[in-house]
Image (tube, rainbow, N blue to C red):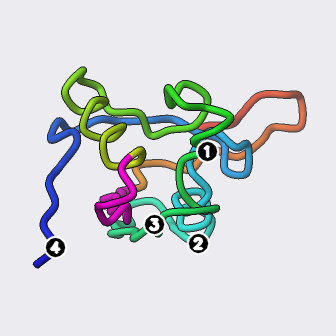
Amino acid sequence: GPQGGAFDKELDFSRTVVGSGQMVKGVDCALRSMKPGGIRQVVVPYGALGYPIKTDPDHILVGPTPTTFSGMRALNFVLENPRVDRTLLFNIKVIRVDKANGKGGFTRG
């Protein structure tokens, strides 16, 4: 049957602006309806909601990006190999939501 593993088992915190294109579209869509303290497992099918392989092959512009070399290598193997299931699973917890202050910055939530 299908098998999978974690690309990165480290607990990592990322800051993003929802709708900015900094995260894969599947994660960005999930974040839009989450509130502080919310936890979700987000399943992202291979394709338009996942990593943009052609425009960002090194996952520099769009994350989340694995924090280890081996994690990056594993992610690249899955995304570049059509013989494996390329569905991704993200565990997300929203810590805080900051609001735009209208001056180009944010007010801590």
Mark 4 neighbour class, 10 Å CA radius: few under 14, some 14 to 19, many 20 or more: few
Q: Which mark is residue 52?
A: 1
Q: Which residue is mark 2?
A: 33
At horizontal 32% and vertical 41% (from top left) the residue drawn is 75
Q: Which mark is residue 44?
A: 3
- In front: 71, or 96? 71
At horizontal 14% and vertical 54% (from top left) the residue drawn is 5
Badge 4 marks a residue whose secondary structure is loop
Q: Nearer the viewer, mark 3 or mark 4?
A: 4
Badge 1 marks a residue whose secondary structure is loop
Q: Name the amino acid, label 1.
A: Pro
Q: Nearer the viewer, mark 2 or mark 1?
A: 1
Magenta stretch, residue numbers: 81-93
Q: Earlier in the sequence, mark 2 or mark 1?
A: 2
Q: Is residue 104 left or right of residue 12?
A: right
Q: Earlier in the sequence, mark 3 or mark 4?
A: 4
Quarter residue 83 falls in? bottom left
Q: Name the amino acid, label 2.
A: Ser
Q: Is residue 72 above or below residue 77?
A: above
Tell me the CA gap for discs 1 and 4: 24 Å
Q: Which residue is mark 4?
A: 2
Tell me the CA gap for discs 3 and 1: 13 Å
